[in-house]
Amino acid sequence: MDRVMVPLGKPRTERADAARNRLRLLSTAREMIAESGVDKVTMDGLAERSGLGKGTVFRRFGTRAGIFHAVLDDDERAFQESVLSGPPPLGPGAEPVERLIAYGRARITFLMAHLAIARAALDRNQPVPAGEASISQTHICMLLRHTQPGIRDLGTLAVQLAAALEAPILLYLSMPDEADSGHHVERLAGSWEALVERVCRTGVDCQPSGSHRRIIG
């Protein structure tokens, strides 16, 4: 299938030392998050832990929320790459419906794993972001087009399906206790799979192009 995911934008051209500092800061931020949680990560703490100056940290991230935004953006790029060129069924090589189900499951898992980071990335002085819904919309629309579900306005359907996955909807869901988080993710993923199967079985059975058939009864 075509690589039609919407990129987050080309990374800025960086000097070698700036690129090393960025990777060092991101790695250090991840270590601090894993060890103590997002609440314990501060600009001063990140500077001290990384061994870089405070000015470097402030120039790189701007605000404390900028730290988490950068971590989220970096992980988002890795997620997109797995969709574009990773192994199936998330990556190319599987049937469209199988990829659509796999995408939703992977996206829900990704978003819920990054829930605390996404919340910490919100800047109170800025509007609440709508998330990367356009990325999901484009990918979902492409997969729906290959399934030929018998619905004329695939764009609108893709918007509605993407809304079931993306922030801020998932971002503001009440998160259960950590011990139950895996079950919560599986419930959301299972609901996504049921939704996709229901949509694709309405009117036209989702088979590869040229072999679809009508559903009777």
Image (spheres, rainbow, N blue to C red):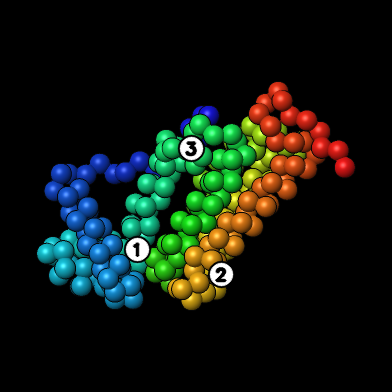
The CA distance from mark 2 to mark 1 is 19 Å
Residue 15 location, quadrant: top left
Answer left or right for 119 relative to 38.
Answer: right
| Vertical order, 4 against 70 (above or below) | above
Nearer the observer: mark 2 or 3; the answer is 3
Tell me if label 2 and label 1 are in contact, CB under 8 Å.
no
Could you tell me residue 161's position as x and y percent? 64, 50
Could you tell me residue 142's position as x and y percent? 59, 36
Q: Considering the numbered disc 2 on the image, is that residue within a helix, a strand or a loop?
A: loop
Name the residue tied to disc 3.
Answer: 88
Name the residue tied to disc 1.
Answer: 68
Residue occupying the far top of the picture = 210
User: Sequence order check: which comes first, mark 2 or mark 1?
Assistant: 1
Name the residue tied to disc 2.
Answer: 173
| Vertical order, 99 against 2 (above or below) | below
Residue depicted at x 54% and y 34%: 94
Could you tell me residue 151's position as x and y percent? 75, 39
Amino acid type of the residue that numbered disc 3 sits on in the rendered structure: Pro
User: Sequence order check: which comes first, mark 3 or mark 1?
Assistant: 1
